[in-house]
Image (cartoon, rainbow, N blue to C red):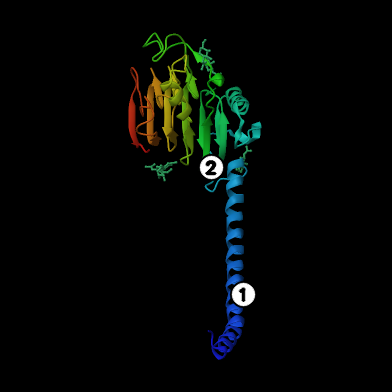
Amino acid sequence: MADPFKLQHRKLEYKRLIPSFLLSHRTLLTVLWIVGFILIVVWQRTAVERLLIYRGMASPTRPIPKLRPLVFNLSDFGAVGDGVTINTKAFEKAISEIRKQGGGQLNVEPGHWLTAPFNLTSHMTLFLAENAVILGIDDESYWPLLPPLPSYGYGRERRGPRYGSLIHGQNLKDVVITGHNGTINGQGRSWWEKYRKKLLNHTRGPLLQLMWSRDIYISDVTFRDSPFWTLHPYDCQNVVIRNVTILAPLTEAPNTDGIDPVLEYQLEVKCLVECQI
Ligand SMILES: *[C@@H]1O[C@H](CO)[C@@H](O)[C@H](O)[C@H]1NC(C)=O
Ligand SMILES: *[C@@H]1O[C@H](CO)[C@@H](O)[C@H](O)[C@H]1NC(C)=O
Ligand SMILES: *[C@@H]1O[C@H](CO)[C@@H](O)[C@H](O)[C@H]1NC(C)=O
Ligand SMILES: *[C@@H]1O[C@H](CO)[C@@H](O)[C@H](O)[C@H]1NC(C)=O
Ligand SMILES: *[C@@H]1O[C@H](CO)[C@@H](O)[C@H](O)[C@H]1NC(C)=O
């Protein structure tokens, strides 16, 4: 049996408790609301910044130095750094302009620039800004086939022609690939998988291959997840590679050797080669 007096007393206690309880709840809600609002503002700002970087519309945080008399920006050739647009034509147009002008610098601005393989030209500097990422398209139908390397005379993994490299050059001189640690990303994962499942009919392509070329300087960029070999100078002279980072998973990437030099050239490797999972 409940004691009526006690019940009455409890009701009173509740009545006294409710306003202060509500009050603290209200304060808590207000505080939460303010914190939430601040979080959303902060999140939006970084999101917008990220989006701009992703779209390639943000200006680089570090100004890009002028290393040749003629300088071009990739976005001026219609490229879109959204990670989805295929920018092969823009790279080709830009590099063809540099060839016509007798040389120049091509700036790859912050953003994710998806592309199929393209060829470099002589007297050019490819400059990858901070947060600039060149993404190799992982659909092999976009990759042109090249004759097998003369030193092997046959495809390394499959007979007959092989896939070219994402960034390629033949019979060039005076080529510089540098930047503020921008990245050339081969998106090798799907290549490795297809290779393991024996779905590829041709030898996989390297990330960067220069053949019969001279006076090559590669520095301050990151090469990541190559389908096959990463840097492959073939029968080149005077190749300098410096302060370059090469990243590939330790276990799941077959034959993504850091640097595969072949035949005669001087190679000065002072680079950081590291692996991560
Ligand atoms: C390239 O872009 C930078 C800013 O990112 C700008 O300062 C420069 O004028 C542009 N150069 C050309 C040739 O459009
Ligand atoms: C690059 O140049 C090589 C040699 O001239 C050529 O076989 C290949 O088709 C070119 N690649 C592209 C993507 O234009
Ligand atoms: C290596 O690259 C990093 C990042 O781009 C740069 O800060 C550093 O100065 C470079 N080191 C040398 C020795 O060039
Ligand atoms: C360059 O960037 C890669 C990853 O994008 C990073 O692992 C490496 O430490 C950076 N190198 C320098 C010298 O900052
Ligand atoms: C490889 O060749 C087979 C038979 O010709 C074909 O069906 C398949 O699509 C080819 N695969 C690739 C990745 O090109």
Mark 1: give few (<14), some (14-19) or many (20+) Cα within 10 Å.
few
Residue at which label 2 appears: 64
Whole-percent x, y for residue 17 in the image:
57, 83
Residue at which label 1 appears: 26
Front residue of 103 and 40: 40
Q: Is 264 drawn above or below residue 98 in the view shown?
A: above
Q: Give the SS element for disc 1.
A: helix
The amino acid beneath tag 1 is: Arg
Mark 2: give few (<14), some (14-19) or many (20+) Cα within 10 Å.
some
Among the 4 quarters of the image, the one containing residue 81: top right
Front residue of 26 and 155: 26
Q: Residue furthest bottom?
A: 5
The answer to whether 250 appears left or right of 95 in the picture is left
Whole-percent x, y for residue 8 in the image:
59, 88
Among the 4 quarters of the image, the one containing residue 148: top left
The answer to whether 261 appears left or right of 142 in the picture is left
Q: What is the number of callouts on the image?
A: 2
